[in-house]
Amino acid sequence: MPWSELDTAAVARALSQIAEQPDDVVDAYFERREEVELPPEDNAPGLRVWREEGFAVRLLRGQRCWMASRDGIAERPFAEALRQVARALPSVGYPEPQVRPAPTASLEDVASELRDFPAAVARAIRAHHVGIAVRMTLRRHRRWLQVVGPRLVAEPQSERFYGCVVESSWGRCGALLPRLDAAAAEEVAAATVALFRARHAPPPASQHGVVVLAPAAVAVLLHEAVAHALEADVLARGGSPEAALGLALAAPCLDVLDDPAGAPPEVRRTSDDEGLPVSRRWLLRGGVVEQPLADTAWSRIAPALVPGAGRRGSRHLPPGPRSTHLELLPGDCKESDLLAQAGGGLFLPTASRGGLDPLSGEFTLCLPHGRRIRRGALGEPVGPCTLRGQVADLLARATAVGSETVPAGAGWCAKGGQKLPVWATAPALRLEDVTVEADA
Amino acid sequence: MTAAAVDATVEQVLRELVRRGLPEVEVLTKRGRSRRLVLELGNETSAYSQERAWAVRASSRRGSFFAAGAGELPAGEAWPELSGRAFRLPEPEAAAPWSQPSDFEAPLIGESEGLQLLAGLGRELAAELPGARLLHAALEDGSSEGELASSRGLRVAFRRRLATLRLEAAGPGPGPGRPGAGAAFYLAAREARGFHPKALARRLADRLSVEATGAPPRQGSAAGSGGAGVPRGELLLAPPVAVTLLAHLLPLLIGPEAAARISSLRDRQGRIGSERLTIVDNGRLAGGALEYPIDGEGMPCREAVLVEEGVFRQPLLAWWQVNGAAPGAASGCCRRPSWRDLPLPGPTHLYLRPDPRLSVAALLADVVDGHYLIDATGPARFDPAGDRFALPVCGFAVEAGRATAPIARAWLCGTVAALFKGIAAVARDLFFLPLDGMLGSPTLLVTGLELRAAP
């Protein structure tokens, strides 16, 4: 952790000076991040490294928020930021607490652990008896956080994960991976091979029927249709966010939680980006909305909402309510049973992206390929298609949940320009009477 | 832009890396500040950011690297190992004389001034369309300056000034708990004071009102109908509609491969569009939000005419793409949106050239039976193989130059060739949107496209 030399007690004392009113919320957010990218071999420049650190000071008073942020972490800029955020200036300057982080490691050899992975994926692709040329971009993401409040100093947090994009003549696929091991190489290889094997498959005819979504596609569905739909700021567009509590949004078979502490160890969190402890938050219990996602600001407006889901894409942007690690609790249906009752339908293993229009509630899930289900087994491949519908209507059409959950990186979410990784653990899911449109 | 005496640390890093056997070295340093003001459903946020960052890229024949970071440029550091392919940097070129616009010196918008602008927008919207409300309004006003230096002798200082405004609004709902139509705008100007609340509120209100009250186009309407009962009359495309289509057509205009891609649109005379179609890109467009005499690699920007009176002249090319594979010359079009990004070719101000003699009112008056499409309500769907597109739009039905009924949930359908060749007139109201760079178009009078109720 780079925060060993950060005098958090002195920072807390300095913050307490600008919290003049009893309900004021003040915090300082310190961030260091590093990204190392290994582009495809034929790209220039070669190895790419981004390193940054900085901080933000924030004051929340009523429904107003003031924030000042800086690149770099040093005493003088910190005192300046305090002064910019404070609503009343003291007769003497603010103290300059020691805020220097530990020095960064040398840039030499930052990519050693990335080098073997492209070869491991190539081997895994060959193990599928497929020989195709691929171009891989591999990026390691590391982030260290420290949030300090006037009365609470949260435990430092860190995240480490990998982003991988594979391009071939038949399209591109991406994955977020908590670690680079043999299982990760196989996951990437399997997705690449599936895209290759579906290369000549025509899109399915637009239809209204049954689909079985594999866990990777369920992860994107949960993120777009459940998590985004239950973010306090999205709910507020239709009225009071609290009005959603107790609403039957989905089929009774859907139990969905956001549990940052249950994420893979490399990205596990004990506190959010506002320094508040995270909780195992039931978004849907038996299809009924129980606890939407909220941060401090929204929980002050809607007191029935519990904070602890505040996330920020950067120190320069204020936090907002977002999910971190979604879980769909397993049902009692084996995958073979899910398929057995889906004759004539589609098995959709992965989703390339999804979208939710917060005002209209229209939801789309883009699926790059799939398989026809025939007599309870997977049949011929089909090409790209889109699952489309109204969120509540779509979630109400879930009829069975698989019994085996698997971790899946749902992918990058860029709501409001704040790009954040989102994770999920999900089983397969069967939806009936849903609309699937063929893609051009 | 000036030939700069760069920071001593920059010179030190250049020397260090050249001494280590890397003949191609480029160092960028950048400082910026911005104010961001947000109104969202009763919440008010005021944020002030100061950024300071650097980026270094270097290459030898053995490979290359790119390193970037926030804070001070590190000197005397170990740099990343070399990998990938080698690259070369451009030879410095002098840019034509340019006078910095006065608004580069304007201070950032103040907190109360900016919040008043947003609140005023909300009030104006409510006045224009009772029941409508602003869901989200975010104003960001920023400026930056920096230096770019290379081992080839480039030494330039640069400044940037840009403000953006993101608006989301909802119209009056049809009943309690039922939200109305929504609309979102994203706009850019050189400084925040360039946004006019009343005009923006009117645009939002028009869009919301049309979406709320409009109906899909009638199939088989008598006048102006195509053979299959699809309205095919004259279509007046307002700038947001034309720009949304243009954004999807950039692959036909950018990079060496564009010449081959666009060749399928050529007719026997070698034309790809009507005589009214002229498309240019110009990084130093006077008054443009991104106006500047040099690009992200320090190369001079100049106007590049990509399509002239319906004839394809050249694609947009960076200096390293000019190798005879495609016609044309480089125009200084490598963009570097942030210190985190590598310079990449792309449009700066790419636009359909307007006709200063024609007003929108004059074009509208000439529409006997057709539609005036004021906005795109979603992204276009393109069939890359068949060249066909479908764009969700809203607007008005027009008869004898007068709007007769609002149209919503409509799809503008056709082919790229029909769009280019069907441009019958262009107005003078050039308008830019921040999409992939600033993309602009005036109002277009087009024939040969269809307006459908479904894609």
Image: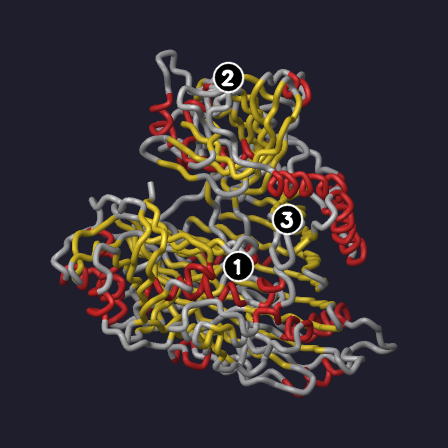
**Secondary structure found at label 3:** loop
Query: Which amino acid type is marked by label 2?
Result: Glu
Residue named by callout 3: B5
Query: Which amino acid type is marked by label 1?
Result: Lys
Q: Earlier in the sequence, mark 3 or mark 2?
A: 3
Numbered disc 3: what chain? B
**Secondary structure found at label 2:** loop
Judge left or right: residue B379 versus residue A66.
left
Instruction: Name the quadrant of the C terminus of chain B.
Output: top left
Residue named by callout 2: B309
Numbered disc 2: what chain? B
Mark 2 closeness class: few <14, some 14–19, many ≥20 residues within 10 Å: some
Q: Residue B243 at what x, y percent from top left?
A: 54, 34
- Residue contact at pointers 3 and 2, CB within 8 angstroms: no
Q: Nearer the viewer, mark 1 or mark 3?
A: 1
Judge left or right: residue A351 versus residue B39.
left
> Quick check: do tags 1 and 3 share a chain?
no
